[in-house]
Image: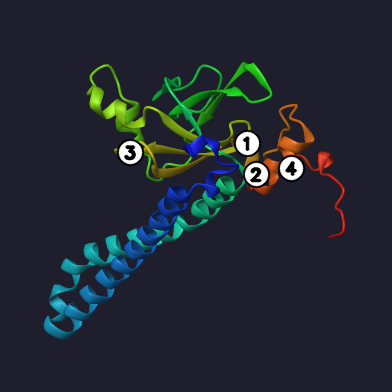
Amino acid sequence: MAPTEYPTAWDHPPTRRAFVQHSILIVLRLLGWIAVWIGSLAFLVVFLSPGFTLLFVPILGYAAFRAVLQLAYIRPSIYIQRVLWQYPWQLMADVPRGRNRHPMVQEDEMWLELSNPEEPGERIPLLFLSGMRTFWWMRRFGTARTKPELKAEIEPLWFAGDPRFIAVIAASRKKGEAPKRLHLLYQRTATGRRGIEPTDWNASPAALERARRSGAHVPDAVRPHSHPH
């Protein structure tokens, strides 16, 4: 079966493997930076005099920073899995994208422009609001001087989700049969942050409930009544 023929992206075995690899790398990097911090401190205490402490402060600080950064990747990874549980993959070619501010938004962030799944004539910008692990994507979004082989790494673009709320994008592995570089995107109105009201985008109740199960915040007024199991 083609990746797009599975009911959800999670039903696609190579996608599950890609997510497991994604999660293992986060854990290994976390443990690695913790080991660097402990090892550097132990080397300083055991083998060197207190006069060398200032030399080790940058190493200890950077290792601590990178360890905390890996912890910050855990929550987006949970949302990635939730999106993959709910939505199928779409393989999209020639998706409009940019590295500068989209004319429809105020934020100066990279963006993709996608069709509203229920109103195909409406185009929706989906921003890279999180700065984590975006450099790889920024290089491939490119400019007029970007090498074509770099741009080709995200053609087609793997997409699962609803651009009105929350989504996962990915690049293709070499044979094009599996995703890599799973990355979470979301609308600011779907984050549930204080002071930001969620919006329903005139979505159907089924679309709103699916987005909610993926972790997006949508208006409570449309929450369906719960049914006993």
Label 4 sits on a secondary structure element that is helix
Q: In the current view of this chain or complex, which residue is farthest to the front?
A: 1
How crowded pointer 1 is (Cα within 10 Å; few <14, some 14-19, many 20+) is rated as many
Task: Measure the alpha-carbon separation of dots 2 and 4.
Answer: 9 Å
- Give the labeled residue for mark 3: 135
- Give the labeled residue for mark 1: 165
Q: In the current view of this chain or complex, which residue is farthest to the top?
A: 121
Task: Measure the alpha-carbon separation of dots 4 and 1.
Answer: 11 Å
Where in the figure is residue 133, as x and y percent of width and height? Answer: 37, 44
- Give the labeled residue for mark 2: 216
Q: Earlier in the sequence, mark 4 or mark 1?
A: 1
Tell me the colour scheme of the image: rainbow
Q: Residue at x 22, y 64 (%)?
A: 59
Q: Is residue 108 visible?
A: no
Front-most of 50 and 177? 177
Q: Residue at x 59, y 37 (%)?
A: 188
Q: Earlier in the sequence, mark 4 or mark 3?
A: 3
Q: Earlier in the sequence, mark 3 or mark 2?
A: 3
The mark closer to the camera, 4 or 3, is: 4
How crowded pointer 4 is (Cα within 10 Å; few <14, some 14-19, many 20+) is rated as some
Task: Answer with left or right where residue 225 lies relative to residue 79.
Answer: right
Question: For the residue marked with disc 4, what is the amino acid?
Answer: Glu
Question: For the residue marked with disc 1, what is the amino acid?
Answer: Phe
Where in the figure is residue 175, as x and y percent of width and height? Answer: 31, 38
- In this rendering, the answer to whether 47 lies above or below 91 is below
Q: Residue at x 52, y 37 (%)?
A: 89
- Give the labeled residue for mark 4: 209
How crowded pointer 3 is (Cα within 10 Å; few <14, some 14-19, many 20+) is rated as few
In the figure, residue 218 lies in which quadrant?
Answer: top right
Residues at badges 2 and 1 in contact (C-beta under 8 Å)? yes
Task: Measure the alpha-carbon separation of dots 1 and 3.
Answer: 23 Å
Residues at badges 3 and 2 in contact (C-beta under 8 Å)? no
